Image: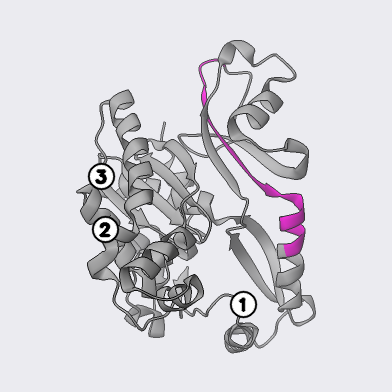
Amino acid sequence: MVIEEFASCVPGNAEAFAEILKKMQPKKSGQHGYVRATCGAYSAKRVVRHVALDPKRYKESAYVNEVLTGQVRIEPDQYALAVLNANDGTDFDFNVASKKDAVFAGMLNEEILALQNALLESGVYPERLEIGTLSTLGAIVDYQVFSQIKTPTLVLEIDADATQSFIVSDSGLEASRSITQGLDAMIPAVQKEIGLKDEEAARKLFYSNAFDFTGMGATLIKKLLKELQSSVGFYEVQTGQSIGQVVCTLLPPKLGWLENAISTQLGVPVLAVDYKTWLAARGITLSGAASKQELNNRWIGLLSLMLSHNHAAVS
């Protein structure tokens, strides 16, 4: 595969997105003018949850639903779901009693429908629509295998309302947790630190590129950090392994300082990915404008959609 160009725009900017599609539209496009695409989605209520199952209960017809409602805390009938092996992402086989580490992954049926309709309305024909979180985690596992990184990586997806926290190693997904502390939870701290009159002013400043928040990073992530330290500490006590690095995959450039703030406070470095060497080893090369693009961790989700992990299966 050859990547010729990267492009991005602010979510919700229909005109900018249309301009990108127009530029990338093949001269002879099928599907009534649609751009055919592989799409990674990060829906608000997506589920990617690591669960240690009880093999003794695999034959119980109600067991999976019990796990979904009790541990994953969702209403199963509202979701399109898959149960995967935590080490390699293949389908989980409940007939194999030795397997107990599973990943429950899915999206709300109504969110899938809304996403598909939105893509079609914007001129994109989704040949494949998948949970971007899953492909990203697979890519990071693959990179750990490729680079022979033996220490686990803390992967964070910080949304507006919540933070999805994952611990992955070269052996797959080790742990997961959803934390009810997202970007919006930092707004009150911004208001207090800068002395603004209301939260709306603080919100606009926080999401703009007009102020450098690096100096107050430790203060803004204080509550989130407490939850992360709790999760990491529990994992390290349970496994005897220490987290070696951290990566935040969904932060826009203007909030890139958050990744460094979290890294500093946790006392571990940011995962440094040698993108070009890794991609080349996986049969992906960059040409033209793409070869000049500075690749950083905000692109890993997009790149993960292009990878095939069959050759790097982990036993």
- Give residue 10's position: percent from left, percent from top: 53, 78
Q: Is residue 132 visible?
A: yes
Which residue, as the protein is rendered here, is positioned at the far front? Answer: 197
Q: Quote the CA–CA distance across marks 2 and 3.
A: 28 Å
Residue 158 drawn at (x, y percent): 45, 57
For the residues carrying marks 3 and 1, which lies nearer the camera in this image?
1
Please tell me which of labels 1 and 2 falls first in the chain: 1
Whether 98 is among the magenta residues is yes
**Residue at which label 2 appears:** 218
- Is label 2 or label 3 in front? 2
Secondary structure, mark 2, is: helix
Q: Where in the figure is residue 37, as x and y percent of width and height?
A: 63, 69
Residue at image location 42% in from the left, 80% down from the top: 208
Q: Residue 248 in the image: x percent, y percent?
A: 38, 58
Evaluate if marks 3 and 1 touch, with contact meaning CB atoms under 8 Å apart.
Answer: no
Residue annotated with mark 1: 12
The quadrant in which residue 237 appears is top left
Magenta stretch, residue numbers? 97-114
Residue at image position (34%, 60%) is 220
Q: Which residue is mark 3?
A: 149
Residue 300's place in the image compared with 233, above or below, is below
Camera sees residue 271? no
Disc 1 to disc 2, how far (Cα)?
30 Å
Q: Amino acid at mark 3?
A: Ile
